[in-house]
Image (spheres, rainbow, N blue to C red):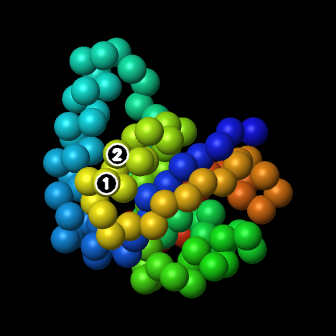
């Protein structure tokens, strides 16, 4: 089982009010320069929020939500400092309640 760390906020906040695209592009470039594997993902309407143990987290976050999920806790801490008005946390996966840590409930168009 792997521990996944996340930054969570409303989709509107993360995708429209914050310069998230620029932040993720810079981080991707840094990883490529260092020949490091990408260990973060942007997930709209993350399914992990449906797990019973995440009920309090989901209740506090405006919906629809979006999350940046990573296996790198330092990256999530850095994002929290950069974005400020976001929730952070962690969860183990895969598990009975979170079989796919990167699953989304967003409809594919």
Which disc number belongs to residue 81?
1
Give percent across and percent down for residue 83. Answer: 28, 60
Q: Is residue 98 above or below residue 49?
A: above
- Number of the label disc, if any, that sits on residue 14: none
The residue under label 2 is: 78
Using the numbered discs, state the Cα–Cα distance from disc 2 to disc 1 in whole angstroms: 5 Å
Residue 62 lies left or right of residue 5; in this view the side is left
Residue 70: image location, x then y, percent: 49, 44
Residue lying at 73% horizontally and 70% vertically, measured from the top left: 53
Picture residue at 28% right of the left edge, 73% below the top:
13
Q: Is residue 105 left or right of residue 91?
A: left
Q: From the viewer's perspective, is residue 36 above or below residue 92?
A: above
Q: Write down the quadrant of residue 2 in the picture.
A: top right
Q: Is residue 108 visible?
A: no
Residue 95 seen in the figure: yes
Label 1 residue SS: helix
Crowd class of label 2 (few under 14; some 14 to 19; many from 20; radius 10 Å) = few
- Of residues 9 and 100, the one nearer the viewer is 9
Relative to residue 56, is residue 80 depicted above or below?
Answer: above
Q: Give me the residue at 48% from left, 50% from top.
A: 69
- Residue 82: x and y in percent read 26, 54
State which quarter of the image contains the C terminus.
bottom left
Q: Residue at x 20, y 37 (%)?
A: 26
Residue nearest the observer in this picture, 64 or 107: 64
In terms of image quadrants, where is residue 37? top left
Query: Residue 30: image x %, image y %?
Result: 25, 27
Q: Residues within 10 Å of mark 1 (few under 14, many from 20)?
A: few
Whether residues under marks 2 and 1 lie with C-beta atoms below 8 angstroms apart, the answer is yes
């Amino acid at each position: 089982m792997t521990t996944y760390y996340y930054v969570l906020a409303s989709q509107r906040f993360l995708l429209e009010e914050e310069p998230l695209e620029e932040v993720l592009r810079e981080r991707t470039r840094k990883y490529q320069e260092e020949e490091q594997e990408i260990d973060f993902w942007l997930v709209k309407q993350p399914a992990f929020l449906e797990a019973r143990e995440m009920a309090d987290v989901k209740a506090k976050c405006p919906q629809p939500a979006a999350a940046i999920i990573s296996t790198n806790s330092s990256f999530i801490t850095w994002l929290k400092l950069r974005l400020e008005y976001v929730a952070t946390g962690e969860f183990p996966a895969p598990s009975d309640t979170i079989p796919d840590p990167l699953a989304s409930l967003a409809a594919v168009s």
